[in-house]
Image (cartoon, rainbow, N blue to C red):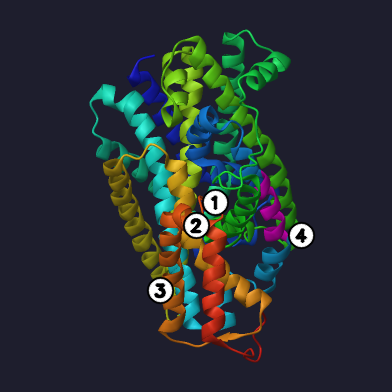
């Protein structure tokens, strides 16, 4: 199919999003942007969060892992599933009880100003790096398979896509994203199912024969029992659980949508429903990955990893499948980028600039500040995407998990320390130093783990190690007791 025709579908899809954004953002205000006026439907939030959690990384990168690791990624998904229950029944009740707009306000109420700012800054750093890595992956696919043929430079592609995201998020924020994410998740899952059906049909397989073929190739292998391996199942499951707690429960982007639901009970329904659906969807993506490698073997395609899915979809399947792949891909792109941009704007405005605490700022002044921050973060996103292009790493999912391990560890420790102890943290630089020092120690542990621990390689459990080291450091600089009126 001509690149220009595929590009036309991309533009048409964006115009649809813009129409939804215009309709949903009417009569919006700052509370609409930050928390959707606490009036979001839990079923819409739950369904839309699938797209946000999966993103372009799952759409492209997870199927590509099957060739080397089989269904081993599902070990992490099992951990994710367990983690969502911890978020639903430990963190969400806390956020609703304190009526938080930014979840990092909890750290201020529990520990004071320094811990609050530290937690918010770690979220901002993590979300900027994680979101732009996801954004880069999808933009790069569009560039390689469509826009290079139209002689459009990479930086122009990145700029235009970020401009698109700005246009439909700058007014309605969360109120709009709840609806656009639902639409985008629908397209993404449709793309997934259609691609599975097309590849099965092209290989003349039905469901039983597909499972038999995948099993014969060893792709359905899930459990890794090698204790020294980074993929050892205990590490993967525990690591996945804490990644969910960090990247969902302690992440303003994900929780911003959850606390926009009317009440705690509905928000918990959202989280539990979402966790079950996510298990099924990830299993489907792994099945798609196995089918792609079967298709590649049958057609003598030597490409592996992140490039395999787009190569097959755009060069070997029908034109209709190619269009559906592109729509599914950009549907995976936008939920991870638009939510991140909105959450970063919210966190910076509320946590760093403190516009909600300044009574002198009226609605219009707050809106002006919010828009300035929103556009600034879009510029930062563009810069980071260009840096990822320069690095040109072929395994974006590994970068994202590594970034999460280093940046969410201190957040995990700060919240755990507040919830499970009654100790106080002193105001000052000590908290900041501990939260910075622990990731540095983890970096060297990760680098030399095989030498230090007799061949044992640290894997996904790096996040937990980082959290434990930070927790220990916080204990050492803390003192007994809790301020009157502060609830842990």
Mark 2 touches mark 3? (CB < 8 Å)? no
Q: Nearer the viewer, residue 316 or 94?
A: 316
Dot 3 lies on which element?
A: loop
Q: Which residue is mark 1?
A: 460
Dot 1 lies on which element?
A: loop
Q: CA distance from mark 1 to mark 4?
A: 32 Å
Label 3 vs 1, first from the N-terminus: 3
Residue 195 is left or right of residue 206, and the answer is left
Label 2 vs 3, first from the N-terminus: 3
Q: Which residue is mark 4?
A: 265
Magenta segment's dominant SS is helix
- Quadrant of residue 95 within the rendered picture: bottom right
Q: Which residue is mark 2?
A: 405
Label 4 vs 2, first from the N-terminus: 4
Give the quarter of the figure containing the C terminus: bottom right
> Looking at the image, is 423 positioned above or below residue 102?
below
Label 3 vs 4, first from the N-terminus: 4
Q: Please name the residue shown 48% across and 13% down the image.
A: 317
Q: Which residue is mark 3?
A: 353
- Quadrant of residue 281 within the rendered picture: top right
Q: CA distance from mark 4 to mark 2?
A: 30 Å
Q: CA distance from mark 1 to mark 2?
A: 8 Å
């Amino acid at each position: 199919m001509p690149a220009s025709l595929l590009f036309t579908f991309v533009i048409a899809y964006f115009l649809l999003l813009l129409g939804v954004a215009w309709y949903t953002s009417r009569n919006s205000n700052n509370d609409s942007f930050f928390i959707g006026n606490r009036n979001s439907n839990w079923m819409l939030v739950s369904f839309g969060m699938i797209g946000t959690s999966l993103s372009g990384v799952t759409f492209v990168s997870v199927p590509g892992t099957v060739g080397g690791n089989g269904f081993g990624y599902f070990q992490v998904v099992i951990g994710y599933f367990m983690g969502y229950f911890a978020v639903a029944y430990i963190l969400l009740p806390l956020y609703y009880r304190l009526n938080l707009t930014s979840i990092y306000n909890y750290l201020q109420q529990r520990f004071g100003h320094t811990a609050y700012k530290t937690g918010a800054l770690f979220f901002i750093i993590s979300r900027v790096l994680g979101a732009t890595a996801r954004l880069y992956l999808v933009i790069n696919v569009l560039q390689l398979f469509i826009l290079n043929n139209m002689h459009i430079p990479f930086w122009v592609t990145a700029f235009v896509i970020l401009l698109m995201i700005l246009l439909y998020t700058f007014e309605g924020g969360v109120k709009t994203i709840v609806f656009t994410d639902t639409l985008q998740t629908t397209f993404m899952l449709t793309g997934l199912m259609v691609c599975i059906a097309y590849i099965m049909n092209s290989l003349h397989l039905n469901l039983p024969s597909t499972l038999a073929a995948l099993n014969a190739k060893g792709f359905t292998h899930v459990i890794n029992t090698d204790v020294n391996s980074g993929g050892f199942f205990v590490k993967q499951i525990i690591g996945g659980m804490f990644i969910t707690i960090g990247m969902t429960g302690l992440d303003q982007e994900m929780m911003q949508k959850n606390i926009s639901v009317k009440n705690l009970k509905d928000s918990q329904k959202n989280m539990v429903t979402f966790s079950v659906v996510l298990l099924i969807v990830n299993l489907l993506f792994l099945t798609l990955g196995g089918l792609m490698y079967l298709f590649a073997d049958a057609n003598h395609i030597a490409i592996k990893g992140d490039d395999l899915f787009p190569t097959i979809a755009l060069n070997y399947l029908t034109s209709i499948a190619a269009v559906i792949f592109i729509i599914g891909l950009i549907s995976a792109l936008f939920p991870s980028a638009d939510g991140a941009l909105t959450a970063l704007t919210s966190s910076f405005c509320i946590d760093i600039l403190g516009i909600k605490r300044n009574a002198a700022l009226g609605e219009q002044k707050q809106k002006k500040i919010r828009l300035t921050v929103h556009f600034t973060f879009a510029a930062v996103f563009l810069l980071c995407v260009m840096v990822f292009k320069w690095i040109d790493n072929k395994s974006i999912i590994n970068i994202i998990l590594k970034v999460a391990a280093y940046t969410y560890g201190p957040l995990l420790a700060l919240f755990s320390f507040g919830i499970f102890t009654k100790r106080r943290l002193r105001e000052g630089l000590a908290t900041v130093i501990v939260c910075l020092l622990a990731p540095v120690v983890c970096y060297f542990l990760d680098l030399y783990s095989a030498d230090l621990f007799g061949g044992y390689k640290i894997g996904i459990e790096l996040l937990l190690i980082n959290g434990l080291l930070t927790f220990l450091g916080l204990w050492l600089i803390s003192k007994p007791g809790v301020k009157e009126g502060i609830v842990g």
